[in-house]
Amino acid sequence: MDYFIQSFRSHSYPSKASPIVLLVALLLISQLALAASSQQGAVRSSRIHQLQTDLLTHPERSAEMITLILSEISHQQGLARAIVSSGVKIKRQIRNLYQVRMPASKVKAFLDKMPQGISARLPYPHSINTVTSQGVNLTGAGDMHNLAFDGTGVKIGIIDLGFSALSTSQAANELPPTGAGLNIIDYTGTGTGGINHGTNVAEIVHDMAPGAELFLAKISTTLELQAAVNDMIASGVQVINHSVGWYGAAFYDGTGSLCDITNTAASNGIIWANSAGNARQQHYLNSFADSDGNLSHEFTTGQNYNTISVSSGKTYTLVLNWDAYPSTTVDYDLFLYDGDPAAGGNIVAASTNAQSAKGRLNFPYP
């Protein structure tokens, strides 16, 4: 089925010479982002509102465990005390960010108890990137192995989303034994398994540098990512591989919370290797254009929508991002239609919440 995407600008351009650049990414990983507003307690992201809406029609989701990221966006004091007093345990803290976990049915009541000036969101959307393992022959690494350059004495970190079938890989001599060349830590509280993407990445690293000591870390949020980096710095890791793509956390211009994490690693002498991603045909990037002055972006001249094809049985996330940093008076909206908007297409979903200070959909994101 074909769907139509439309983006509107509801305020004027900031005073800058270059036009605003829009980035819309389509991801096959999560629920569709919808917008709403909060009247009490913590300021909720639109994805939290959508979760609460889903619970009304799908009560069977009420027992689903949900991870929330809370932050003090107005230097509110005592957030940790407020969280603990509500009966919820803090799973992780990085600076002014707090990670908590609870059943979906308790999310609304918990956030209603939080002080004003607190931002709440779900973890940033993220997905694994494709693994291919013919690198040794393609790069000539075997010749380096023959010259005794096989990674011996080097510590390599692999931060990923899951390491299932690890023992199977070790039994097949694809990876070294745990404690004898391989170390692994789960930062999620759900165990080191799940998907085998991290195991596959570790096998590639081991193929390329069979003498290196491996440090594996399973994460699912940026707070867990920072914690893993901190521990790897303390352990003397010299190289980190992170074959994961994150969405909506920055504009891919070297700024943002994820870049702060990688900069921390780099400032401690770590080489950071990150895959480029697999979304070349799943994103749109262009400068905002509005020749007819109707405040709707023209994907092509005179056409205020872009068409995407979706399949039944899959879930999708749409992320709109723009480059108006560090501040902006521009507020964008995003709409998804089931037909041409000009021909009476119905709005399937929309994100119209107000943004401020940062160019991202579903603000506030700490």
Image (cartoon, rainbow, N blue to C red):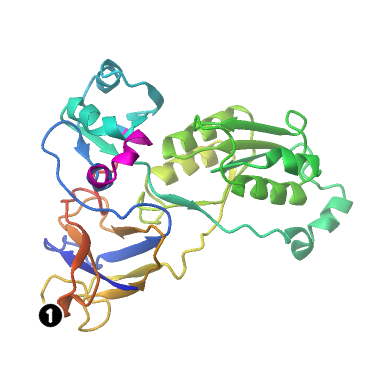
Image spot of residue 258 (x, y percent): 43, 45
Image spot of residue 365 (x, y percent): 28, 43
Left or right, 229 with reference to 105: right
Q: Tell me the SS state at disc 1.
A: loop
Q: Which residues are magenta?
A: 54-69
Left or right, 132 with reference to 127: right
Q: Nearer the viewer, residue 29 or 177?
A: 29
Q: Is residue 69 visible?
A: yes
Task: Name which quarter of the figure residue 180 lies in.
Answer: top right
Identify the residue at horizontal 72%, vertical 38% (top origin): 167
Identify the residue at horizontal 70%, vertical 58% (top origin): 133
Task: Name which quarter of the figure residue 22 lies in.
Answer: bottom left
Quadrant where the N terminus is found in the figure: bottom left
Identify the residue at horizontal 43%, vertical 46% (top origin): 259
Residue 222 is one of the magenta-drawn residues: no
Is 364 placed above or below 330 here?
Answer: above
Identify the residue at horizontal 34%, vertical 31% (top origin): 103
Task: Name which quarter of the figure residue 271 lies in.
Answer: top right
Image spot of residue 251 (x, y percent): 36, 56
Q: Is residue 73 visible?
A: no
Task: Kindly give the residue lying farthest to the right in the view shown.
Answer: 146
Image spot of residue 321 (x, y percent): 30, 58
Q: Nearer the viewer, residue 321 or 29?
A: 29
Q: Please, what is the three-letter code of the amino acid marked with disc 1?
A: Asp
Quadrant where the C terminus is found in the figure: top left
Q: Which residue is mark 1?
A: 292
Left or right, 41 with reference to 54: left
Q: Nearer the viewer, residue 357 or 292?
A: 292
